[in-house]
Amino acid sequence: MAGAGPVLEVELVSFEEVRRGTARLGRVELRYLVRDHREVFVSSAIEVEREARGPEIDAVVAAIAEALVAAAERLAEETEAALAAPNRQP
């Protein structure tokens, strides 16, 4: 959806379990950009991993969920900062 205001475009690149030795982790990676019809204010990627608290699939799912929450929070912070930047033209 596009209009006169800023647009946030997000691509979910990964949403997965990662194994490192005996460790199991949840991993989420997002690519995003904030733009309007004239310019791109910011374009970046966010990658978050959270270690599972155990080897069971429920623990891995919880780790992926925690990584998703952390990535979403970081996305909100970075988007807010991009829109509040002093050199941004309204």
Image (cartoon, helix red, strand yellow):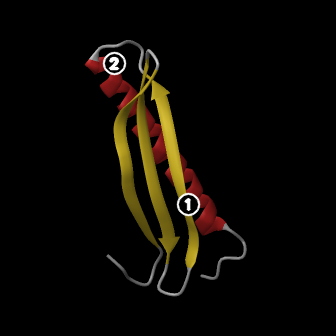
**Quarter holding residue 8:** bottom left
Q: Secondary structure at mark 2?
A: helix
Report which residue position mark 2 lands on.
Answer: 59
Q: Is residue 39 above or below residue 7?
A: below
Q: Is residue 82 above or below residue 46?
A: below
Say which label, 1 or 2, has the lower sequence index: 1
Residue 38 coordinates in the image, percent (x, y): 53, 87
**Image quarter hosting the N terminus:** bottom left
Report the front residue among 49 and 19: 19
Report which residue position mark 1 lands on.
Answer: 44
At a point 49% along the width and 80% down the height, the residue shown is 36
**Image quarter hosting the C terminus:** bottom right
Q: Is residue 31 above or below residue 24?
A: below
Please state which amino acid type lies under the numbered disc 2.
Answer: Ala
Residue 55 coordinates in the image, percent (x, y): 34, 13
Count of marks overlaid on the render: 2
How crowded is the residue under tag 2: few (<14 C-alpha within 10 Å), some, or many (20+)? some
At a point 44% along the width and 52% down the height, the residue shown is 30
Residue sitting at the far bottom: 38
At a point 63% along the width and 60% down the height, the residue shown is 81
**Quarter holding residue 64:** top left
At a point 27% along the width and 19% down the height, the residue shown is 58
Please state which amino acid type lies under the numbered disc 1.
Answer: Ser
Residue 87 coordinates in the image, percent (x, y): 72, 76
How crowded is the residue under tag 1: few (<14 C-alpha within 10 Å), some, or many (20+)? few
